[in-house]
Amino acid sequence: MLKNPVSQTILHYVDAQFPLLYLNTFEETKVDSLIKSVAYGREILEWNASKGFVHFETKSPLLDSIKTVEEILYALSQDDELNGKILVLKDIHHFLDNPHVISTLKEIALKIYNGLETVLFLVSPVLKIPTELEKYITIIEIGYLEEQDVKQLVRRFLRDNQLPDIANELLDELTIAFKGLTEYEIVNILSLAYSKDGDLTKKDLELIYDQKFQVIKKSGILEMIPQNETIHEIGGLENLKSWLSNKAKVFKNMNKALEYGVDIPKGVLIAGLPGCGKSLNAKATAQLFGVPLLRLDMGRLLGKYVGESESNMRKAIKLAEAISPCVLWIDELEKAFAGIGNGANAEVATRLFGYFLTWMQEKNSPTFVVATANDISNLPTELLRKGRFDEIFYVDLPTAVDRKRIFEIHFTKRRRGDMAAIDFAELSRKTEGFSGADIEGVVKEGIERAFVSGKQQVTTQDMVSIIEDTASLSVLFKDKIKVLSDAYKKNHFKSASKS
């Protein structure tokens, strides 16, 4: 009985004569081990882009006369050349726009359906499925290492390099830091740390974080956002900030909370007017929770090939879960699932939405989702039901108290020494209908104008003159704001601000 769940999955597909198994990964060493574990003595043939036909174990070239994948597939598709064997094709995505390759793979797949005892493994870090092969290919994602696997890997490295054991506390920190990295990357980092000072210490965590940043950046879908904002830099929104602070206590004491019977926090949807602090809240949440902030760019999910968009979604979510605990920020959620039910991208958008909805409902990883949206009228009603997010807040235009606090925050950051001379209550009264972004713009421009004029101090009047020249959000989008505000209240969303 195979203990590795991926091996078990592959074995089930092999036994069931699924013709084309697509292993979406770049960890070829791990793939070789998995394929070998399900071969049960069958001969394994391998073709790769650099050497052509090679010996599976040694990777030494074979059959010099046959170089291209087109030639190798044609030769092996004749008679019963593949019967009782396994064929592995590495980096196959480079050749899946070749009609001859597609046609031959389809021909082999049909022969397997008709009794040919073989299976083809398509191995590639890039998921690329031609429409002609969609019905014959089964995608198998090679997941990230579990915490226990990471610990075993670190202990094995220590043992192999005759290093002393490390404290359990440091091992736990290294394990959490390594989450989301592949076995190959972990071993490389451990080797680099060992070569620097001949030991593993807490300083080596910096190497891990640098590598993790690289992994996320190279994914092309997720982005790691620096944590420069704190919850104290948000003016107003006291209800939302208080709610997030409570969730932070749970998040920072996860094990105790679970033992007590508390569920793992799922996330929050913050809907509301643009420029009123939604994005700032997402950034501040990660700092409050003390975990990395990942931003999911939904626009990058859409792929050219069949199944590519869904694969990108799975990849992004798996990476976020592997790196967890973390905050996953999904900005402008309504744009992500635009077109559901109609339009050219309706089918893809519907599948993406279904996958995301299921994940939000069933997820049990410490991946806290902060989704932000401007217009909830475009969001499917299924997403707004209880059980998807822990809570839904709406962010309205700031109140008089909030506006005063926003002015104070921006002056504290830029001109603290001038605050005694500023009548913040007056500025608050003058900016009714202004968004937080409007107020920030007023402060920036007022300070700049004072500097250009050669003034030693910024005054209330400097700000007032800018306010009088500014068209606020409530003026520019009066009708739209009324519609959005009514929709938030109709759906009984919680107000982020105290009334």
Image (cartoon, grey):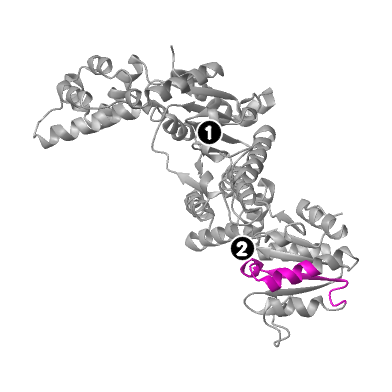
Do the residues bearing badges 2 and 1 touch, measured as CB atoms within 8 Å?
no
Left or right: 201 as drawn, with respect to 258: left
Mark sitting earlier along the chain (2/1): 2
Place of residue 82 in the rendered image (x, y in percent of width and height, measured from the top left): 84, 74
Q: Mark 1, residues whose alpha carbon is within 10 Å: few (<14), some, or many (≥20)?
A: many
Residue designated by label 1: 371
Q: Looking at this rendering, what residue extends furthest in the front direction?
A: 343
Could you say where residue 436 lies in the image, as x and y percent from the top left? Answer: 34, 26
- Mark 1: secondary structure: strand
Q: Amino acid at mark 2?
A: Asn
Residue drawn at point x = 87 percent, y = 78 percent: 79
In this view, which residue lies farthest toward the left?
454
Position in image of residue 396 (x %, y %): 43, 21
**388 vs 419, nearest the viewer:** 388
- Residue at 53% in and 36% down: 333
Which span of residues is magenta-colored? 80-107
Give the secondary structure at mark 2. loop
Write down the residue under mark 2: 161
> Closer to the camera: disc 2 or disc 1?
1
Is 277 or 487 nearer to us in this picture? 487
* Rendering coords of residue 315 (x, y %): 62, 50
**Rendered position, 285 above or below 423:** below
In the current view of this chain or complex, which residue is farthest to the right? Answer: 115
Is residue 476 rendered to the left or right of residue 62?
A: left
For residue 213, say whether it is visible. Answer: yes
Residue extending furthest top? 499
Q: Quadrant of the C terminus?
A: top left
